[in-house]
Image (cartoon, rainbow, N blue to C red):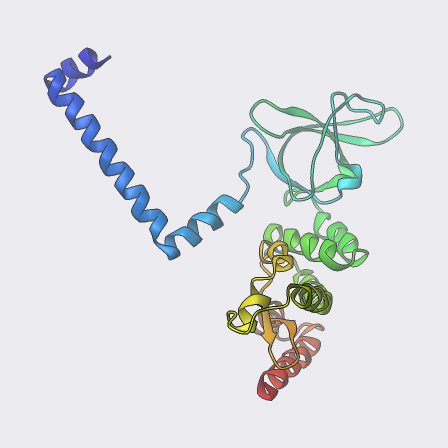
Amino acid sequence: MLEHFSRNFSLPIPTLTFSIRRATVRLALASLLFIASPALLASRAGAKSKRRVPAGGRAAVVVDERLSALREEPALAGALARRLGRGRVVALTGARRAADGVVFYQVAVTRRTRGWLQSECFVAPARAGDDARLLSLITSSKGFDRVERARVFLDLFPRSGLRPQVLLLYGEAAEESASQLSRAASNRLAEDRLPADAAPLRSYYLNFNGLDRFRRQGVAFTFDESARRFHYDGAAWREIVRRHPHSPEAAEARRRLDALASRGARK
């Protein structure tokens, strides 16, 4: 192989070998510099978190894991290949209605994994009415389930007229979860019995591992140290006021932002 490259590039084999080694070292150094930069590291982590759509079809996202059995045939009695988790991105490649009326879509999960999914377990931007169907599912959900499904909607349907409703539900669920997270963090830290020379209290709270899965859904929390309580930072409410100021949800969003600002003033 080296001889082939040497002929094509008119380089002697030792020179080419040295060049390849030097390029490898440079690549390694560049990787180290990339990892060492916090900003670049954050952007890299964000890029990894975005799931890629398998090639060969239209994008869809699993939102109801209760129905997300990937089957080898388009039938409820079809052999189970695997079960897909909520948020999994697939590519739609075909559709078929079973004898009992249930509609199945043929999907690609990876380049090597394919099967059939029940129509109701996923939503797709290209399928009419899926934004309304997902809103109905979000409304019937609670807590983190509501946050996660709302995040799918906000990522998948950026131009939907239902977006203000979902933003309000997303923010409400985040603030309700903040109360539960505050209690859990307080109980955990009370058990730990922090030493007198410990790090600042707020750093323990804001490093609480219960926040991690919310952060992955784009939810950020502030911390009221005097009350030892988390609060949602209000990003969804600000988006409603900024981008949908005349929507029915705008008045409630402003009320919640005023309450958030008032809490900040009392700190």
Residue 227 screen position, x and y as percent: 66, 80
Give the residue drawn at x 61%, y 88%.
266
Quadrant of the image containing the N terminus: top left
Residue 14 screen position, x and y as percent: 12, 19
The part of the image, by quadrant, that contains residue 144 is bottom right
Give the residue drawn at x 21%, y 26%.
20
Tell me if residue 19 comes above or below residue 52 in the rendering: above
Quadrant of the image containing the C terminus: bottom right
Camera-side residue of 164 and 229: 229
Tell me if residue 51 comes above or below residue 148 in the rendering: above
The part of the image, by quadrant, that contains residue 173 is bottom right
Give the side of residue 105 with respect to residue 101, left or right: left
Residue 244 screen position, x and y as percent: 61, 70
Give the side of residue 124 with respect to residue 34, left or right: right
Camera-side residue of 216 and 99: 216
The part of the image, by quadrant, that contains residue 5 is top left
